[in-house]
Image (cartoon, rainbow, N blue to C red):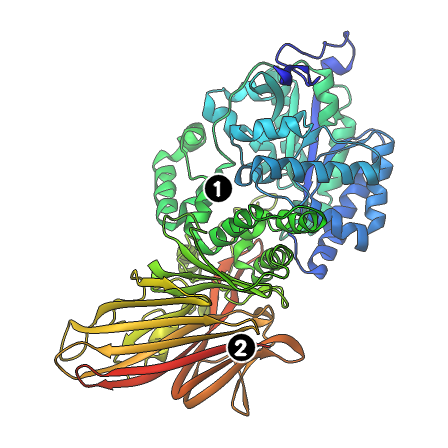
Amino acid sequence: MGRLLTGRRTMTDRPAEPPGNAVQDRLRFLFVLHNHQPLGNFDEVIQALTDRAYRPLLEAVRARPTLKLTLHVSGPLLLWLEHRAPDYLDLIGELVQCGRLELLAGGLYEPILAAIPHEDRIAQITLMSERLRSRFGVRPRGLWLTERIWESAIIPSLIDAGIAYVLMDDRAFLTSGFAPEQLHDYYLTEAEGQSLAVFPIDKSLRYLIPFRPPAEIEAYLRWIVQIGGRLAIAADDGEKFGGWPGTAQWVYTDGWLKGFLDLLEGAGDWLITQTAGEAMEGVRPAGLCYLPTCSYVEMEEWSLGPDGGRRFEELKNRLGADVDRFIPHLRGGHWKHFLVRYPEANRAHKKGLALSRLLPVGRRAAKARLDLLAAQCNDSYWHGIFGGLYLPHLRHEIWRHLARAEALIRRRHKLTVELSDLDSDGAPEVWVSSSRFSAQIQPHRGGRLVEWTDFAGELNLLNTLTRRPELYHDAIRRAAAQPEGAPRQGIPGIHDLQRAAPADLVSALCYDQWERAAFLDHFFVDPEPLSGWAGGRLDERGDFTEALLDYTPTSSGVVLQRSGRVRTESDPNHPILLHKEYTFTENRALMVLYRVQNQGSNRLDVRFGVELNLFLPSLALGHTHMTLGDRRVLLDHPLDADQVERFTVSTQGLSPALHVEVDHPARLYSHLVATVSQSEEDYQRTVQGAAAMPTWDLRLEPGNTWEGRIQVTIE
């Protein structure tokens, strides 16, 4: 019963309709902008977007005294602007003070609210709201929902954080049964009788603005008036006004923005611009709504992956001219399916949740929690039209904050080994940690090392990305032979861009056989495996890479072993015993002992290799090299070197460096791990890590054992 005494709006509270006036007879146009840049993005990228999109658009609106807008500046971008472009924030403040601009809240670090706990949602929103209040003197009532990922479970969190309204794609309403003509209004939803207003974002306006001529936009707005609509809600990314390909020329140089603002100013007899908060106060809600778990249709398609995406496209093609009519009832995937498709994203997500449960009390906990909240920034957990997960500097920023948080949590802790299902897949990881590092080993996946976070360097040394098929790879393969479509008036939206695909990019499309990690154990017979291994086509003869190994935790690591089979030229099922022992030390070193025993009745002739996939932040910039003894080699070409006893992966002048030593001279193979992904501008080849595999020729008589050690040291 206590919740009824909070003073929040309940389902029986409604704003009264104001007395008849000119505003009531006009269409209320809500111009809502969402400006966001990921945590950790390059300064020059954010500066360019500020100069090309954010600032010129706001200056153009300021010059039109009758126009109003609603603006969301994401927390990561706000933090950057405070230090790098305070004059832009001054411009926002000027418009706020004269009542022409309403600011929206969000999570301070722009998380997917549905993917974080209730307490974290409230903390994220409260931190953002307080920052806006401190800087601009206003506390926001509305919230921009990150990537418009809606789950009804977030409603209590929004209400508890003081949010009165959100904006959500009209698809959510159409999917739940509303007719298109009903969506030029706003509605109330509720949780346990506590109300939250929801404004449907008009998809047609999203696709018209700024890509079509103002005359087409005017025609659509007049149609809304004709059907009795009270609100026209245009809400989308601010980057589309100068930041996306082709938009700077079209919006500013070619005069689209002037024509659009002229339209809004000149339509005063039938249209008025308002902020979302003004509209909510001036118009009664149209009724009640209950929205399904969903997002905008493109996000639902992206989350499906290539196979599901092809089926979705096929179904849309079968519908032909009726696709727009039925698309609300075609469901794609859930945003959280990205955590299934990309285990690297899931690992970071679940690591943050695990560390949250370990937070101590006191001042140290507050600092650690802020880093954990920062690690919830959404961009590195998914991939669609933008780089997202495929951008290593964004993933590095997430792991940097996780490292900072865990370093605070484990300060003065001794080396500890525990079992915990960190990634929520039903099988425990061996979690080894101390005051200097944190590592995860997966006994159920070949005993591989999937995380090794160094607190001093603030990085996960295994933050690589596996090469996987993506739906748009089909388009890359078709692009060279596909003629361009006929030009039309306006410019293409970001989802309709025709991207060039050079031949070398097509040839770079290859996919990994296993998830990238360290200490992947391979058995093969190919005397020249480099090309096949680098191309994801290693002729693996063993059955250990994805197998469950028996394991026994120790005081400093874990011992793993398994009896398995190797397919040799003379025996398709040759039995061997693989023994693997991890030993971590407090001085940032790891030693792995291997034993391979021939358990068959015949001699074993096979090659044994241990794959290491390593990450340094500078790899993607081409600044990392490998040192073999006293010889330095660049990593831009595959490497085949014999009689190697030690090698180093490092960046000149920067730390840390990774030193690898083996106790038997090895033939070393190495190559860069590069993915092909799409961005808002083009297709990109991006270096995600460096793969190295020391190998040995094993010639074992029945019952004999080969023993070798690999030591990796961080300096």
Residue 397 locus on image (x, y percent): 62, 58
Please name whichever residue, 145 or 207, is drawn nearer the observer in this view of the structure. Answer: 145
**Disc 2 element:** strand
The residue located at (49%, 53%) in the rendering is 345
Within-10-Å neighbours for mark 1: few <14, some 14–19, many 20+:
many
**Disc 1 element:** helix
Total labels drawn: 2
Q: Which mark is residue 319?
A: none
Residue 258 visible to the viewer: yes
Identify whether 471 is placed above or below 532.
above
Within-10-Å neighbours for mark 2: few <14, some 14–19, many 20+:
some
Q: Earlier in the sequence, mark 2 or mark 1?
A: 1
Identify whether 524 is placed above or below 377.
below
Indicate the quadrant containing the C terminus: top left, top right, bottom left or bottom right: bottom right
**Mark 1 lies on residue:** 335
Residue 63 visible to the viewer: no
The residue located at (65%, 18%) in the rendering is 230
The residue located at (18%, 86%) in the rendering is 701
Farthest residue toward the top?
A: 19
Please name whichever residue, 169 or 211, is drawn nearer the observer in this view of the structure. Answer: 169
**Mark 2 lies on residue:** 713
Res 387 → quadrant: bottom right
Amino acid under label 1?
Trp
Identify whether 111 is placed above or below 402.
above
Residue 62 locus on image (x, y percent): 83, 38
